[in-house]
Amino acid sequence: NGLSISLNKSKSKNKGATSDPYVVVHSNGNILHKTKVIPRTIRPNWGLRTGALFVLSGTLEELFINHPSGLVFEVRDFDTYSDDDSLGAVVVPMHDLFFSGRRRLE
């Protein structure tokens, strides 16, 4: 099992009707993981094939101490010729991740 991330409909920052979204996971200003870009879509779904699986290593105490405000999952729109745009983000507290019991977090 792994984390599955999906959007019902992403807002496009491009002149066209779609985006080229990817997810950046960060905490305390440090990037922990980036998924692959899913080209030309408004309904992205990240799973094993798109690089959504990643592992945080350390003791339970270290994870809570090193990431006190939780993990930020930010969806960004890849742009070839300009800075990537943020399409939105959600913060998931470490407590919620730890006690999720492998169930889907909405």
Image (cartoon, grey):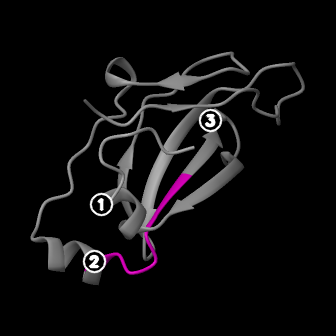
Find residue 64 and report its horizontal and vertical position in percent: 28, 77
Q: Are marks 1 and 2 in contact (CB under 8 Å)?
A: yes
Label placed on residue 98: 1
Q: Amino acid at mark 2?
A: Phe
Neighbour class for label 3 at 10 Å: few (<14), some, many (≥20)?
many
| Magenta highlight range | 66-73
Placement of 14 over or under 104, stated as above or below? above
Residue found at x 35% / y 49%: 33
Question: 57 and 34: which one is in front?
Answer: 57
Neighbour class for label 2 at 10 Å: few (<14), some, many (≥20)?
some
Mark toward the viewer: 3 or 2: 2
Find residue 6 and report its horizontal and vertical position in percent: 57, 30
- Compare marks 3 and 1 and give the one earlier in the sequence: 3
Q: Amino acid at mark 3?
A: Phe
User: Would residue 3 be counted in the magenta stretch?
Assistant: no
The residue that disc 3 covers is 78
Classify mark 1: helix, strand or loop.
helix
- Give the spatial CA distance, label 3 vs label 2: 31 Å
- Compare marks 1 and 2 and give the one earlier in the sequence: 2
Residue lying furthest left in this view? 59
- Compare marks 3 and 2 and give the one earlier in the sequence: 2
Neighbour class for label 1 at 10 Å: few (<14), some, many (≥20)?
few
Find residue 77 and report its horizontal and vertical position in percent: 66, 37
Mark toward the viewer: 3 or 1: 1
- Give the spatial CA distance, label 3 vs label 1: 31 Å
Find residue 75 and report its horizontal and vertical position in percent: 61, 44
Q: Tell me the quarter of the picture where residue 67 sits.
A: bottom left
The residue that disc 2 covers is 64
Residue found at x 64% / y 54%: 89
Q: Tell me the quarter of the picture where residue 30 sits.
A: bottom left
Residue found at x 32% / y 23%: 48
Relative placement, left or right, of 68 versus 6 is left
